């Protein structure tokens, strides 16, 4: 299992190691926070990213990674990138740190220049391309991609290129991404909200390149079939229970039918909400040997109220 708090040689959309004072957290709280649970949908999505990365250099290809907020897109991306950077061939050398993957966020007002600026910012501590008067920012990006032998670019918050989100025309940005893929043999990941799929439908020349793998993440459900179903949800909760025990804090059985139903109602099956619940539980009781149902209920009630308020806001 990859620890997603591992320090990476690149700034992955504000690196975890740089923006969280890890030393402030008790060890078992920190460990629970950064452990990743490989339920089947997460693993299938990870396989899609692995396969897409494997094709880099052979042809310009890509995949989409879509899902509602909180379903684990960012964690999946970080898990995947950390896994790649752990490989021997991508370890730092005396003269160069290999940068096979970079991940950038599509800015709120996306332009070709702003995309290029994000790429240069991500790689600036490893290589600053020589610049002469009159050199365009596109040329500088080309030099960076070639020098660092970048194989994949992940475009997070891809929905910012949608007409209803962007305040400016973005067709030229889409065309620029296609050119980058073709000129450098890049594999590309578009990550964002499900509605971003409609943008690709407007650009068949790009959507064809992005059809190598279609990766989707969902909230858990209580349904018997489909992605992130009841079986996956139970396995996910059992993994959390096992991690509590492994970290020296015994917690009561969490995977009973009654408790699974209650957990679903309190978190709406959203992995981020589930994580927030159990991170709070561990933070509150990290120095205890065991957590009983009454102690768990104190934290559970707070999360449940938040979920109810969220549902009410949707109905207004």
Image: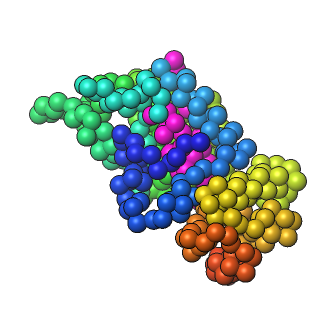
Tell me which colouring the rendered structure shows. Answer: rainbow
- The quadrant of the picture occupied by the C terminus is bottom right
Q: Position of residue 22 (x, y in %)?
A: 41, 60
**Left or right: where 64 falls relative to 132:** right
Q: Residue 255 versus residue 72: which sits nearer the camera?
A: 255
Q: Position of residue 249 (x, y in %)?
A: 64, 64
Residue at x-position 29% and y-position 44%: 121
- Range of residues picked out in magenta: 58-85
Compared to residue 151, the image places residue 282 above or below, namely below
Reply yes or no: does residue 62 show up in magenta.
yes
Q: Residue furthest top?
A: 58
**Left or right: where 149 falls relative to 34:** left
Compared to residue 43, the image places residue 57 above or below, namely above
- The quadrant of the picture occupied by the N terminus is top right
Residue at x-position 36% and y-position 39%: 9
Compared to residue 283, the image places residue 22 above or below, namely above
Mark count: 0
**Left or right: where 65 falls relative to 129:** right
From this viewpoint, is residue 240 visible? no
From this viewpoint, is residue 222 visible? yes
Q: Residue furthest left?
A: 133
Residue at x-position 31% and y-position 26%: 93
Q: Position of residue 195 (x, y in %)?
A: 62, 53
Q: Residue 74 versus residue 118: which sits nearer the camera?
A: 74
Reply yes or no: does residue 297 show up in magenta.
no
Q: Position of residue 19 (x, y in %)?
A: 37, 59
Residue at x-position 68% and y-position 72%: 291
Residue 122 in which image quadrant: top left
């Amino acid at each position: 299992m990859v620890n997603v708090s591992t320090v990476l040689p690149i700034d992955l959309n504000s690196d975890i190691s740089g923006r969280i004072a890890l030393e402030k957290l008790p060890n078992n709280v920190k460990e629970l926070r950064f452990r990743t649970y490989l339920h089947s949908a997460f693993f299938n999505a990870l396989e899609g990213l692995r396969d897409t990365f494997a094709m880099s250099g052979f042809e310009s290809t890509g995949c989409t990674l879509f899902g509602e907020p909180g379903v684990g897109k960012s964690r999946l991306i970080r898990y995947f990138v950390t896994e790649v950077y752990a490989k021997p061939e991508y370890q730092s050398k005396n003269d160069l740190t290999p940068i096979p993957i970079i991940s950038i966020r599509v800015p709120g007002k996306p332009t070709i220049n702003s995309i290029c600026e994000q790429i240069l910012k991500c790689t600036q501590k490893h290589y600053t391309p020589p610049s002469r008067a009159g050199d365009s920012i596109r040329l500088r990006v080309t030099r960076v991609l070639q020098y660092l032998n970048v194989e994949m670019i992940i475009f997070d918050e891809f929905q910012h290129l949608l007409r209803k989100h962007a305040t400016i025309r973005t067709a030229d940005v889409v065309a620029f991404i296609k050119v980058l893929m073709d000129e450098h043999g890049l594999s590309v990941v578009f990550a964002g909200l499900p509605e971003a799929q409609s943008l690709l439908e407007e650009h068949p020349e790009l959507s064809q390149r992005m059809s190598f793998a279609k990766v989707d993440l969902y909230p858990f459900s209580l349904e018997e079939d489909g992605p992130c179903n009841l079986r996956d949800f139970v396995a996910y909760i059992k993994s959390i229970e096992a991690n509590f025990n492994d970290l020296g804090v015994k917690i009561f059985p969490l995977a009973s039918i009654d408790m699974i139903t209650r957990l679903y109602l309190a978190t709406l099956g959203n992995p981020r909400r589930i994580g927030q619940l159990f991170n709070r539980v561990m933070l509150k009781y990290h120095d205890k040997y065991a957590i009983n149902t009454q102690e768990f209920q104190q934290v559970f009630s707070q999360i449940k109220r938040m979920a109810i308020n969220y549902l009410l806001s949707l109905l207004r």
